[in-house]
Image (cartoon, coloured by chain):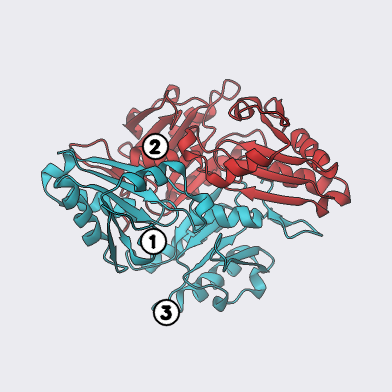
Chain colours: A cyan, B red
Amino acid sequence: MTGSVIIAGLGPGAEGMVTPEVSAALAQATDVVGYFPYVARVAPREGLVLHGSDNRVEVDRASHALQMAAEGRRVVVVSSGDPGVFAMASAVFEALEAGPREWRGLDIRVLPGITAMLAAAAAAGAPLGHDFCAINLSDNLKPWDLVERRLRLAAQADFAMAFYNPRSASRPHQFARTLDILREECGPDRLILFARAVSTPDQALRWERLGDATPEMADMRTMVIVGNSQTRAIEGTKIVYTPRSA
Amino acid sequence: MTGSVIIAGLGPGAEGMVTPEVSAALAQATDVVGYFPYVARVAPREGLVLHGSDNRVEVDRASHALQMAAEGRRVVVVSSGDPGVFAMASAVFEALEAGPREWRGLDIRVLPGITAMLAAAAAAGAPLGHDFCAINLSDNLKPWDLVERRLRLAAQADFAMAFYNPRSASRPHQFARTLDILREECGPDRLILFARAVSTPDQALRWERLGDATPEMADMRTMVIVGNSQTRAIEGTKIVYTPRSA
């Protein structure tokens, strides 16, 4: 088999954050597969087939990509951010493991990208400048109890925390619950960042204290970062950072 | 003041992982500041002054960068990986906070990069495909007790874990202690990745079970990733990944 699947991260939105190796992979592809808005970021050209699909069909999409590679196509599966962080890489490997044995001989590679939490942190200063964790707040694929347990242990470990998928129309109450847990564990003065649409023309950053944070400050385009106990704002600037000694 | 400081991430080593916005910033710089081996990655040119400095002088280096910007220079501070992850961004902000008040009016920006854990994860499959944490195992700037506490809580939260600076000549025993704690908390069958010099010609990846892992498998050029309880290898491939439902 000569086909391949490259799982590539497009970064958070800005073209200046797409790595050259990802651009090169897209230039060589015969097929690009992904969620509609990410596929829309790839320029059409002669000889390239764009396969946009809906959200929540990740494993179907991944199987389609693997099947096309098995037929000899050069397929690029696109994710926003980094494909290995709450994105398509794990979905492709789930499909690979569940699929026909011959898929395991395919050339499959993951090309990293700038993930949303690091773009948000950079735009805000350096709130993830010391030990930190990343948690997907969606309970589509895991029990909510596990999310609550991880939140409490992460707070007790004094990690800075980055939250992906904080809030959606179908899960309006969970982010409110998240804020309650964080206030219990970290107190009202802890800094929390709401970073919306980072690196795009719609970018909006907002720092609050946990005591003043409300669920409406986040939506599905928002990356939420909570500082650790040492995270601080620099007076006279918009910079928030976590010291290296935290 | 018209000077600026851009704190830029060069990624883990491969030129194909340097973002276009970082390349553009370097092309506009009058001065590049950083640890010698990272400054050595920047091509010399007319009008560009390269200021390489030794390790462990991060705040001096940061103050020098801010001082040059205050004098009107366009300074780029380079880090490997991402500057906001155990790198120069927090050091610059510590120097900014401690320095002359007028520095706070400078144009200071952070440009994210591909951090080592995400490049290592991509090279190995998708071991960070679900909730995870990043811990700096060096105790140069924090008490070792805090590292141990974070390790145990992270294991109890069933996070996948990425370890930066796992081992150095001056701290030979701590990574051995780390492995002991992980075996206690996670058992001998948990997967652990040693990813050395990722994305460079020296790249070497090695997966082990915790029960078989030894301290000598890591050095200062090694990124260590420990899977969560669901992390698995795909038989017949070299791929290790964490399912999305973990």
Identified by mark 1, the residue type is Tyr
Mark yes or no: residue B62 visible.
Answer: yes
Mark yes or no: residue B185 visible.
Answer: no
Say above or below: B125 vs A49.
above
- The residue that disc 3 covers is A169
Whether labels 1 and 3 belong to a single chain: the reply is yes
Percent across and percent down for residue A58 are 28, 61
- The residue that disc 2 covers is B183
Front residue of this view, candidates B15 and A142: B15
Front residue of this view, candidates B221 and A196: A196
Whether labels 1 and 2 belong to a single chain: the reply is no
**CA separation, marks 1 and 2?**
41 Å
**CA separation, marks 1 and 3?**
21 Å
Residue located at (39% from left, 37% from top)? B183
Judge from the rendering whether residue A239 lies leftward or rightward of residue A228; answer left or right.
Answer: right
Whether labels 3 and 2 belong to a single chain: the reply is no
Residue located at (73% from left, 43% from top)? B92
Identified by mark 2, the residue type is Arg
- The residue that disc 1 covers is A38
